[in-house]
Amino acid sequence: MFLVIANEAFGYTHRQTLDSSFVVIVSMLREHGYLINERNKMYERSDEDDLGEGEEWKYITDFKTGKPKKIKRVKNV
């Protein structure tokens, strides 16, 4: 599983991952996770500011978590 995660995150082959230091790979994965979380938080915050005049949010139930999820209402043309 570790080899697959390093491949998806950094594009490393299995051989490159095995040749690298475990500590370096783990620290790079932590940094990668931090950056992805910060990016996602930024997108969540910017969604609230993107509402134009006459637009509104609707709440639907997320099937995976069972919690309400906020989505922008789309009007039919």
Image (cartoon, rainbow, N blue to C red):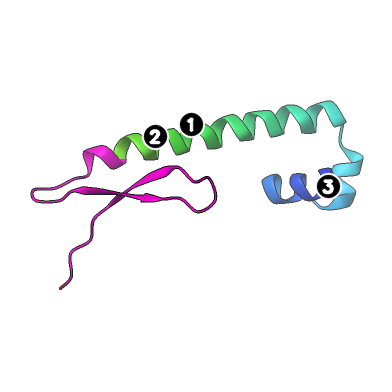
Q: Is residue 65 left or right of residue 29?
A: left
Q: Is residue 56 magenta?
A: yes
Up-down: is 50 above or below 30? below
Looking at marks 3 and 1 on the same chain, the residue that comes earlier in the sequence is marked by 3
Q: Residue 72 appears at what percent x and percent y?
A: 26, 52
User: Is residue 18 or residue 66 the one in the foreground?
Assistant: 66
Relative horizontal placement of residue 24, taking residue 37 as reference (left or right): right
Does residue 4 sit above or below 41 in this rendering? below
Q: Earlier in the sequence, mark 3 or mark 2?
A: 3
Left or right for 62, reference 3: left
Q: Residues within 10 Å of mark 2 (few under 14, many from 20)?
A: few
Tag shown at residue 38: 1
Foreground residue, 9 or 56? 56
- What's the mark number on residue 30? none
Quick one: SS at disc 3? helix
Percent x, y for residue 57?
24, 47
Of residues 53 and 63, the one nearer the viewer is: 63
In the displayed structure, 32 sits above or below 9; it is above
Which numbered dot is residue 3? Answer: 3
Which residue: 64% across, 29% down?
31
Circle 2: residue type: Met
CB atoms at circles 1 and 2 under 8 Å apart?
Answer: yes
- For residue 75, what is the image quadrant? bottom left
Q: Is residue 35 magenta?
A: no
Label count reads: 3
Give x and y (percent) for residue 24.
79, 28
Circle 2 residue: 42
Residue bounds of the magenta highlight: 47-76
Image-based side of 20 in relation to 9, left or right: right
Q: Name the residue: 26% across, 38% down.
A: 48
Considering every residue shown, the one lying at the far left of the view is: 53
- What residue is rendered at 39% in x and 34% in y? 42
